[in-house]
Amino acid sequence: MFDFTIVIVAYHNYQDIVNAVKTVDCFTAKEISKKLYVIDNSCLEPTAPEKLAFLKKLSEYSFVEYRDTGKNLGFGGGHNYVMQELDSQLHIIMNPDILLTEDSLFQIREFMKDESIGMCVPRLTDEAGEMQLVYRREITLFDMFVRMFCKNVFKKRFAYHTMQDCDFSSPMNVPFAQGSFLVIRTALYKELGGFDERYFMYMEDADLCRRVNQVSRLVYDPYTSVIHKWEKGSHKNKRLFQIHAQSMFSYFRKWGWKFF
């Protein structure tokens, strides 16, 4: 059994994934056993030059296993693709745009020795070291509207929703943390059935966090940090915005239409 399994879902962002894998290799202590799965949703032909170059780079890392899904399964579907194969104590849900800068896995393993913690999220920063607003209170329709359209108008509400009044120097329970880098007990991940695949992309992380908090605790870990580039694609792309809106509808239909 590994200390950690890691899944990164690819969708044409091959260079980001190579960079992410490199930092996992560089900053993780040799005593930490790990297996990293790259699940490829890109739907490229096996002989595509960019795919061949990517596979050649991945072959340099013995702890990495590549899987081609042959179709775009979405974010949750991609992460669930090898769920039943995971043989580890802890499992990391990791975005391609994550970079490690220290031995975060060792520290997280220590942090997760508290068995009351089912899932944790470290300090996520941008490349300049500024902490990102990825920790949130319970999601409401109003908060989603504010965050997407008018956070500069309802500044106090946005600050409250993103927990800016909290002390991030200490561990604390978190209702929802963005799914860029989440560490969950593998047994719990399997027990919950992984991500709800009714969400093709977006909101599946909020749904998973909510289900974890029903049976355990999602806790912020202040003792280590990772870099998250955070492209914010749905804010820039009309099609991604539509997918985001559909996922929001699915989320509130499942959990109830809470407006405020």
Image (tube, rainbow, N blue to C red):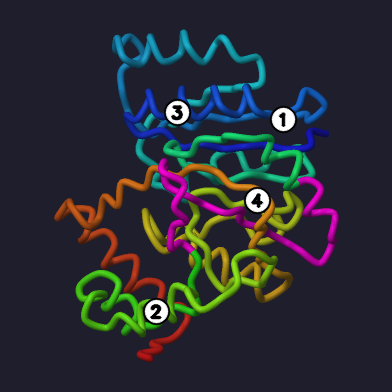
Query: Dot 3, crowdedness within 10 Å: few (<14), some or many (≥20)?
Result: many
Residue 253 pos. (x, y %)? 39, 79
Q: Earlier in the sequence, mark 4 or mark 2?
A: 4
Q: Residues within 10 Å of mark 1 (few under 14, many from 20)?
A: many
Q: Nearer the viewer, residue 4 or 186?
A: 4
Q: Residues within 10 Å of mark 4 (few under 14, many from 20)?
A: many
Q: Which residue is mark 2?
A: 252
- Image coordinates of residue 200 in percent, x first then y, are 37, 54
What amino acid type should be assigned to the residue bearing mark 1? Lys
> In the rendered structure, which disc, 4 or 3, sits on the residue that comes first in sequence?
3
Residue 34 numbered mark, or none: 1
Up-down relation of residue 246 to residue 46 (above or below)? below
Q: Which residue is mark 4?
A: 183
Q: What span is colored magenta in the figure?
A: 109-134
Element at badge 3?
helix
Rendered image quadrant of residue 86? top right
Quarter of the view holding residue 63: top right
- At which x and y percent is residue 102? 64, 35
User: What residue do we see at 70% from left, 39% from top?
Assistant: 105
The answer for how far apart the CA atoms under marks 4 and 2 are is 25 Å
**Which residue is disc 3 drawn over?**
17
| Amino acid under disc 2 | Phe
- Mark 1 touches mark 2? (CB < 8 Å): no
